[in-house]
Amino acid sequence: MKTRALGLVLLAITALLFTACPNETTIGRLTSDPARYRNKDVVLTGHVTNSFGVLGQGGYELSDETGRIWVVTNRGVPSKGARVQTVGKVINGINWGGRNLGTALEETGRRFR
């Protein structure tokens, strides 16, 4: 009986851990159907192709083999050419510096790869 209860507890913990993990996807999938990822944490991996920032805030363009997307951040921007994995929330209709960036990612975390 204890083994069965322990198994159920482990199953419940595993289910909770997997539901808390952000969805890793490609830029192409995200930009083709941004509504699918709304209000969810999304993980993207790619190379920085453009970046600008002032006083720890800014944005950078992330590129993978499927497309490009702008990432808005308040953590400072990585340098051009850096390979990064970013976590964030999808935002639509973002305007920055007088430019409409369309679908973008609001960064909540980053890791250099």
Image (cartoon, rainbow, N blue to C red):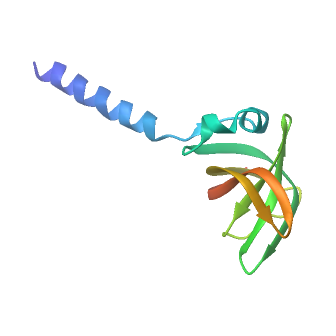
Q: Residue at x 86, y 62 (%)?
A: 99
Q: Residue at x 64, y 37 (%)?
A: 35
Q: Position of residue 106 (x, y in %)?
A: 66, 57
Image: 37 above or below 93: above
Q: Position of residue 47 (x, y in %)?
A: 83, 49
Q: Residue at x 74, y 58 (%)?
A: 94
Res 53 quadrant in image: bottom right
Res 112 quadrant in image: bottom right
Res 57 quadrant in image: bottom right
Q: Position of residue 77 (x, y in %)?
A: 76, 67
Between 2 and 9, the residue placed more toward the observer is 9
Image: 43 above or below 96: above
Image: 67 above or below 5: below
Number of numbered discs on residues: 0
Report whether 78 appears left or right of 38.
Answer: right
Q: Residue furthest left?
A: 1
Residue 94 visible (yes or no) = yes
Report whether 37 appears left or right of 3.
Answer: right
Image: 59 above or below 57: above
Q: Residue furthest bottom?
A: 55
Q: Position of residue 85 (x, y in %)?
A: 70, 49
Between 106 and 51, the residue placed more toward the observer is 106
Instruction: Please identify the quadrant where the N terminus is shown.
Output: top left
Residue 112 visible (yes or no) = no
